[in-house]
Structure formats: C-alpha cells, structure tokens
Image (cartoon, helix red, strand yellow):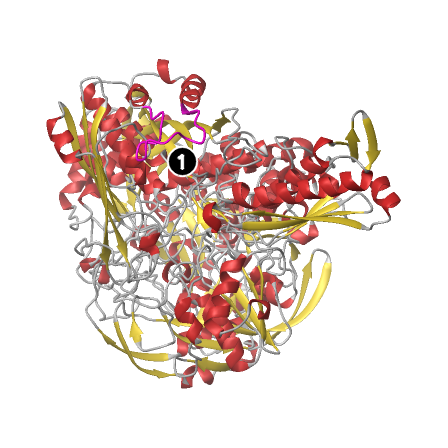
Amino acid sequence: MKITSPKVSRRSLLRGSAAAAAASLAHARQVSAQNAPEESAFEAWIDLRLTVNGQAHALTVEPRVTLLDALRERMQLTGTKKGCNRGECGACTVLMDGRRVNSCLVLAASAEGRKITTIEGLADGDTPHPVQRAFAEADAFQCGFCTSGQIMSAMACIEEGHTGSPEEIREWMSGNLCRCSAYPQITAAVAAAAEELG
Amino acid sequence: MRDFSYARAGSRAEALDLGQADDAAFLAGGTELINWMRIGINAPARVIDLARVEGLDAVEEIEGGVRIGALARLNDVAQNPLIAEGYPVLSHAILRAASAQIRNLATIGGNPVQRVRCPYFRANEGAPCNKREPGSGCAALNGIHDRHAIFGWTEDCVAVHPADPPVALAALDAVIVTDHPEGGRLIPVREFHVLPSQNPAWHDVLRAGELIVGIELPAPAPRSAYLKIRERESYEYATVSAAAALEMDGGVIRRARVALGSVAMRPWRLVAAEARLAGLAPDAPEVADAIDASFAEARPLSGTEWKVRLARNAARRVIELAAEA
Amino acid sequence: MAIGDIITRVDAPTKTTGQAIYANDVNLRGQLYAAFVGATVPSGRIVSIDPAAALAIPGVVRVLTEADMPRPAPSFADLYVPPLATRHIPLQGLEIAHEGEPVAMVLAETLEAAEAGARAVDVVYDAAAFTDPALAEPVDPDPGRGDYSFLDIAEFEKGDAAAAIAAAPVRIARTYTQPSRHSNPMEPCAVIAEWSGGRVTIHDTIQHVAALQGVITGVFGLEMDQVHVRSIHCGGGFGPKGFIWPHQILVPMAARVVGRPVKLALTRAEMYALVGMQPHMVQEVELGADENGRLLGISHIASNETGVTEDYIEFSTVPSRTYYACDAIYNRQYIRRGNVTLPTYQRSPAEGPGSWALGSAMDELARELDMDPLDLRLANYADVEPSSGEPWSSKMLREAYEMGAERFGWRNRPAGGTRDGHWRLGYGMADSSQGTQRYGSSARVRLRADGTAVVESSFSDIGTGSATVMRQIAADILGLDESAVSSREGDSVLPEAGPTWASATVISTGTAVHRAATEVRGRLARLAGWPADAVGVENGALTHEGEARPIRDILAEAGVSEVSGDGTFTPNGGEFSDAGPEGFPSRVFGVIFVEVAVDPELGLLRLRRATGVYSAGRIINPRTARSQMTGGIIWGWGMAAMEQSRLDPVLGRWLSKDLAGVAIPTNADIPELDVAFVDEFDERSGPLGAKGIGELGATGVAAAVANAVYDAIGLRVRELPITPEKILAG
C-alpha cells in the first residue's frame, strides 16, 4: 500500500475546529509553579522492551544509548551501520513504525513500543525481499557499507510513493550518501523494485 | 555524551510539569538535541521525551488560518494538503530541508530551536565561540566566515540561523505558540530568534521550561515559493535561501512578503523592499531596485560580500517563482 | 561464467541482507571499547594529563597515556614509510604534530562510557606556533623524511622546456590550485585486536592485509605467523585505508597493556584528523605550441602540503610527461611542510590532481589557438610514451576519442552559453589516464571432488568487485559455472596478495589467480592422461580433441579429493612492485565529455550528462567495471564542484570534521552517466590482457567540468572546487 495521505492530515480532517480552538494559546492550561516534578519521574537506567523485526528484546540501558548502538552493540544486529553518528549520512536508516529514520538520532528509550525493522528483517527466510533483489540485480552497491541504509530507505521511498520519476527517486534517496557512488544503479534499483511492487 | 536521566511525558501538562526540573531539556524529534549532547553544546542532566504526548501533532484549520501542532513531523506538515496547497512556501521549505529520514523525526516545533551551523560552534572539542562559552570570543570573525552573516551581526557573533522552515514562516507572519507553567506566549516567528546585538549567547527567546506547542499560520498564501541555494542538490544547509508570499492584482503585486535565510541570526524580512514591490509586475525591472532598498542595511563581512549579491539575486528570483506558483 | 560476462557481484547476498561482517561488527568476549582524546592544539607539547574525572565515570577501566604505552621493538626502525603511513606514532611522547592527534586513549566496558570518558580527560598543553602548510615555502622533498620520495621522481627533464616555451608562437602560463580533500569512505576506520599466547589477531578494514601484518611484526618484534590479520569486508577505501596509520598500532598496543581485546572505531571527526587526505596543491603549468597546436614545450611545477614529520609527495606532474607528444618537458615536485595530518594517496593518486591542472591548461591553450580541444589532443597524440620514447604496451585512445565524441555528440554540440531558462549550458572535455602499477601477488585455486572450486588469496575487496572478478577468472579457466566457484580473501592466513589500490588488483592478483587456475587445469589434464597444453574446458568438463570428460569423473577415477594449484605474479626483477612490462610503458587511457548547467545569478553548477570512453585493456566483468567508471566520474564531480577541507588559519584545525560542513555528492547530484570501453586486449600486460581501471574514471573530470564552466559563462576557474562564490565572482 502506498501512503497517499499522511497520518497527520487524516487525523486533522477528522477533528473539528473546536478542538483546534481548545488547543490554542488562549486556552493554554496554566500549571502551578508550585507543582515541582517528582525526581523519581526521571530514570537513570531504563528497562526496555524493543520490538525489532517482530522479535521482542529486553534490555536495560542508560538513557543515552541510541537505538543504533542498542542494535549494534547490545543486540548483535550489526547490519545497521554507523557512518557518521550525526544524521549526516543515512547509513543507520531503519524503519520505525514503518517510517524511515536515522537510528543514530533516536534514543533506544524513545523506540520502546515502536515497531523497528532493520535490514535483517526484510528477507523471508532465504528469499530476499524484492528491494534486496533489485539492489543485487542493478549492481546498486560496491563496498556495501551504506547498502543496508540505502535498502531501508528504498523500502520507505517506495512505500511513500516517491518513485514517480528518476528525479524524484534521486531526491528522496539523497538522505543516504554512497561514497563509492553507486547512485545511478541505486536509482535504477529503486525504480525496478517500485515497478515490481506495484 | 554525558549521561542523563530520562522521563517520558504522557501529556502536555506532564511535560510542563517535568520541565520545571533543574537542568532539563525537552526531546522532540531528537535530531538536534542528541547531537548537541554528543558534541558538548548542551549537556542536560535530565531529558523529557515528548514522543508520547498526545494531541500536539495535528494540522488543522482555525479561524483565519491553520494551526500546526508542535510535534507534527516535518514530512507530515509538508505533505498535508492544507499546507501543500495553502502554503506552498512552507511545504517547499520543509521538503528542501535535511533528508527524508530526518524529516520523519524532526518536528515543526523543534525546528526553529535548531542552533547555528557555524563550524566553530559545532566543533567537537570546542573553539572560541560566544554561543558555546560566553566571553570566549568569535573564532569565525578572525577565521573562515564566508558562509556567515550579511545582516545584523556583531563582533561577538557572525553566525546565521540555518533552518529552512522558519524562513517560510517568517514570510508568512506565522506565530509560535508556547506554554509554560507561568503562562504561554504568542511569539511571532520574526521575533523568535535572538540577534547578537540582543544577546550573542542566545539562539532564541524561549525561557527555561517553556514548551512550543504549536505554530499558527494566518490566511493561506497560495502564491508563494521557496528558493534554496546550496552547493549540492540535496541534503545540505542553505548558502542563502529566500521565501516569498505574494498577493496579486491581475499581473501586479498588491502585497509582497519576502524573507531571506542563512543571511542573519534570524530569518530576514526585506521590509523596505516589500513596500516598494507593491504595484510592480513580478518581472518588472524595477523589482531589482525595490529589493536593493533592503540591502542598504547589508553589512557584509570580509568573506561574505559575495553573499550580498547572491541574496539580492535570490530575492528577485523567488518573487518570480512565487508569481508563477 | 567466463571472462567478459556480466556477473552479479558475489557479495550481493550478504551485503543486501546486512550479513556482511565489517571490522566494527566484530565483537569479542571481554572486549573493551576505546576512545581517543585528541589534541586541541596544532603544535606544542603535552604538559599534563589528568584522567581522574574520566576514571570516575562508571565503566571506564583505563586511561592510557604515553607513559603507559609500550615502545616499538627495534625492528620498527626497519619498516618503510609507506606502507607504514608515518613513523610518528602518538602516545609515544609529548610532542604534538597536528590538531586532533591522540594524546590519551580511554578504555571502557561500553562505548558510551569510553566516549564520555574521552570528553572528561583534562589535558594541559604548552601550545607552540603552528605552520599553515598552504602558506609555507615550497621546498625540495627530503629523502630522509620518510620513503615517499622514492615512489616516483621529483624532477624530470627532457630537452629544454623553458627555451622551447619562450620561443613558441603560442604560450600560456597558469597556476591551478586545489584544496585539501578527505576521502571519507562511508565506513570509518575500525580495528579490534586480541592477544593470545604471544600472538595477536587483528580485525581491521584495510586495502592491503599483508601491509598491516608486516607493520605489526615490525612494531612488536614478531614473526609473520604470530600476527593474524583479517579484513573480510572493507567499507570503502579511496586512500586512507591503504597505508598503516597510528591507530592501527595503538589498538594492539592497548590490548597488550590491558590483556583484553580492544575495539576502536574512529569517529567521523577522527577520519579528518587521524588518517591522511589528498593534499592542498599548487600547480604551475606552462605550455608552448605552434600555430597548429603542436606542443613545443611543457613545464609543470607542483607543490603539495605535507606534515611536519615526513615528506609526502603527490606526484601530480606525471601527466605532463606521459599524456602528449612533446620534445621538451620539465617537471618538478616541491612540498610545503606544516602542522597537518600527513597526506596520503587518494583516488586518483598523482593523476587526479595532475590531470586537473594539465587538462585545464590544454583547454586554455585550445581557446588561445581557437581550436577544438579534442583536435588539440589529436594534434598531440602520443604514439609512443613521451618521457622515454618507448612503445606503449597497448593504447587505443584514438578509438576512445572517436567513440566518445560520437556517443556524446561532441562535434555537433550546442554553442557554449546556450540558455535553458535561467541556466546556461556548457560543454567540456579532458583526457583521463592513469599509469599502471603491479604488485607481487599469489593465489591458490582448489578444485574439489564435487566439481566446485575455491580461490584463496589475501586480497581485499573494498567494493571494487575483486572477489567477483577473481572467481570469474578461475571459472573461465576451469570451465565452471559461477555458482561452482567460491573464494576466501582478506585474511593473512591465505596466499599473500598485493594491495587493492592503484588499480592494481586485477592485473596483479588476477594474474596470480589465472596462473593458479591454469596450473589446476594442467594437473587435471595429467590426471585424465591428456597433454596439459591441449585441453579445453566446457560446462564442468575437460575436453580434448572432441572428447569431453566431466571434471568430477576425472577426480573420482583418479581417487583424489582435490586438485590444487598455486599461482604467482612477480613484478620485474622480483621487486615488490613495478609499472608494467619492461620496455613497454603501460597505462590506461580515456576521455571524458561533460555537459554542465550554470546559473550565474545564483552561483549554481549542476551536471547534466557525461560520457566516458576508455581504452583500458580487456574488461573482465563489464558490470563491475562500469560501476568503477561511474563511481570515478562522480568522485571527479565531487572534486570539481564541492569537496574541500579547509584549515582554520588561526586555530590550525580542520574547519568542519563532519559530513554536514563538507559536501560530497548526493544521489540528486548525479544524472544518468554514459560509459563505454574500447574492445582491447593488452597482450603484454599478462595472460588476462587486462589492465587496471579503478583510478581511471576519476581523472580528467575536474578539468572537463572547469572547461565546461568556461564554455557556459566565460569564467575560467583555476581554483577548485567551483563553488557559488567563484561563479558569482564571474
């Protein structure tokens, strides 16, 4: 299924303007300054249950641990790569509730309750996902280090429907740098997979 | 990254409540805060995760305009029909920002809080920077500053605000809506960022514990456009950007609002030019003269004289683009 | 599968599923995570290091400083620089050679604790004045400062170039500059080391397994069999994973000190400070020609930045003595020392920078002569190698020019400056070329009773497709299907292969694999009772005079479980490397045509299309070869249009040590690219008829782009990259 109407807009269309007015500043709830938050609300260690590729993982982490480092260093899911750790390269792209995100910019704690999909979760047993197959057939990689992120990004790009033309694919795949510069083949692979997935 | 303790806010009220704790920071999309903590720009003792706050991500019509919940993700805002059709300048600005992945995380409320991209400010190990360490000086002033300010800088800070959406929002006269235990505010986007002459250490006017809850747009501006200039075609901050919203009478501009990005510490409205643009055709030769009126106050650094020329050309071009929208 | 067939990469199944294991994916029981504390001054001395705050962080185990680290064994002094990138190893003393150099190393139970610990170490420096190499005086390289000066020649003279140029009716003299430029492979360098009973195992990501093995033996005074190096996958090389950098020595040192495995991945910022870059260069080119464009004299004088510890030389003058027929040539290489990381070879070494300067100067000369730049090339076509006068091993550049011009439509291109809305279109071309390098290599091919074969060699597949091509070569010789041939590579227990750099892998290791497979085929023939030189192969069977016997049957009947063959490639004179067959200078050639669009009001430069056609010997796998060429063209586009690392003139640090402040091309920057090869077999290069292509595509591109910008808007940019401020200045 292609996402033709973003989630937020659908929800907003269901809501009336009365709800909007209630949320506007004039009606902002005043909170008493005396209500200091309880220190216990803040945790120094967090017990997490992360759902990755359909499997539940329990782990206890410091809040500063990112989703990327949790996947790589604690769950041995090393297919997701760290290229910059700043959101500047896209190598760590995963799907969170079906949407592509840079896992280096997500705290593991924030990912609790979300459905995480990584490169390891795409194939059906030994049968690669059509997007994985398209990357192989189009020769859409060289060193392979950015490839997991490219494929996860391609999954979302196709799902979002941003595959109408080579130009559109190029723009919507530009959050994934490839220093080997397999860009023309990546564009071709995304187009081919989009065609196959209809 | 220094360790911190973490709490999830389940509601706006709870977020505000938690926000009163000492040395606490709100976490929305995380695309900035997590990097600040890595680099040492900011090392809060407590982080309040807003991801589970309900009801702050809607895009909805209000009387006379549209209201966007602060936690709406950038991609959702840009592709929402109310925005894409009513405010193309905002939609374009968002879709030219960062990458598809980052726009799935980053929120419209968090975006204006983005901090400068001055390489000295972003140095891992810290360089003289009055925004990093007040009083330490401005390394850019004596160093490399050819991507820096042409308007409104002082010797204490020559950085520019890098974000795209606020440039569009400034052209639209949008208002940032905040909440705070002691009372929220309506802050025009044009006044949200702090010029170095006001305070070189600050980025914006938010107080501790003050939470952006939404952004309100006045009447739709279908004849609007955004132009972003950068060395590469995508996934890069602007060298200069320009936003324009026009109201037309036949082939003639009735009202123009034009803002430039990446030229100052805040989106820079070309107020003097706007007054002179009224009554002109968008492609009239006089448009250039009208724009020049706003460049009388331009004061380039030794490295940014070229940006004056570029910004002037960008303003002229974006008016053409808006007229064609 | 045969040589010349289009084969899908053999690593596709693992690389598209996240199963390919890179160095930083290796986790060992009991490992500690390492993080460096980098010097915040570009020059000076460490006064004190206080680790207390770091040690107070839960999880931090040790903070190692120079006082804690072992000193190298005496055999360290015998190592050459390169393959050791630099003899200046941090944490061995108190002197700081450049900003970002490690001054301490924090070891912790978690990555987060190591990184937090590194920020908490308090270091006091006595800062000294630093030298910006861009402003330093050019001087002659000192052969005593490292061994880089032995890799090519610093001064070349043929005829009297100065007199010839002075007397020439048409002359140009121009200076071309380019910035420091970091390779930024997507995979940051990473290494994990573990000691066990006096032996060390190192998982690394490198372009040359044997180099690390050799350096580590020298550092620790070990024998080769005490050092096990694995680099199964390498997430991009491009230079900084070629030679052996200090972090690759410090990690095994630390592991030895603490008696636990130590794992380190460089941060993206450390990729700027701890491994080398392409140096900032200034190149002065003078050309003298007659009215018909025939070159009468060429002078090319280059200087590159280098560090304060060794003299690295970027031999960019090579093109001036190898591209065009000319009787009077002068080349000279200088260096400028300063407080920066030592530069290193980057795609494309020597000729990437050299072809930018010479390719631009030739275009300027063509304009001066009012001559088509392609005709100027044809007027100076080098039928023999210009510096020596010897015949080429093979060269079909004329054919490449013709095919390229045809495919691109060069002869009937629109006029420069043609408008497309606000855009102005421009067309440019330049020569691509790269000299051949070959390295001693060995390989083993084992044919098993089940009819499958395995290729074994320690070569590193850095994404160039080496593993695919090696299997393809063996399959071709043995007549096997691609699915029947596997390979083991990137491990020092395997037969030693040369490096994956300088386009040398196919011509060197490929030849070794070819010989090993041929040896196996000969043994198989003997088992079958046929003469080894008269058999053929077909679909898993050995053939002789119309008779075919399945390989499996031959092995079964002979009662052997495996037939193994070794093959080696040895450079001329038994040396470690050479530059091609003796007496026949060898290089690869090509031409690049580009169409650019320039928006002069907004300072924008975009690539519209490009055609590259190459004369590069036989192509083993057209698919991986095409990818090498398009990747090279895009690498060149980055060089032309955006890439640069700038050194702050006051602080002596790289301005932006990240991927947000330094632009490299994105997908949206790149249109469809047109690539073709001339059908060619270089019989002198070896049994494969192949040469190297990895560096070729990136040469000439920057010049072609600058030439196209001139064509579009009449602005000659002689300082890379061609960024908006330069276009707006025009």
Residue A18 seen from this side: yes
Q: Height in image: A111 above or below C112?
A: above
x then y, percent, for residue B150: 20, 48
Does the segment drawn in magenta span residue C689?
Answer: no
Which image quadrant is residue B223 in? top left
Q: Count up the numbered dots.
A: 1
Residue type for callout 1? Pro
Mark 1: which secondary structure? loop
Write down the region rendered in magenta: C381-397
Neighbour class for label 1 at 10 Å: few (<14), some, many (≥20)? many
x then y, percent, for residue B11: 56, 64
**Principal secondary structure, stretch drawn in magenta:** loop
Viewer-nearest residue: C409 or B92: C409
Residue B312 seen from this side: no
User: Residue under circle 1?
Assistant: C585
Viewer-nearest residue: A112 or A195: A195
x then y, percent, for residue C538: 76, 31
Horizontal arrangement in the rendering, residue C678 relative to residue C528 (left or right): left
Viewer-nearest residue: C522 or C549: C522
x then y, percent, for residue A139: 59, 37
The residue under the point 57% across, 61% down is: C23
Quadrant showing the C terminus of chain B: top left
The residue under the point 62% across, 78% down is: C197
Residue at the limit of the structure toward the right, as seen here: C557
Horizontal arrangement in the rendering, residue C141 relative to residue C458 (left or right): left
Horizontal arrangement in the rendering, residue B285 relative to residue C709 (left or right): left
Viewer-nearest residue: C164 or C373: C164
Q: Height in image: B198 above or below C715?
A: below
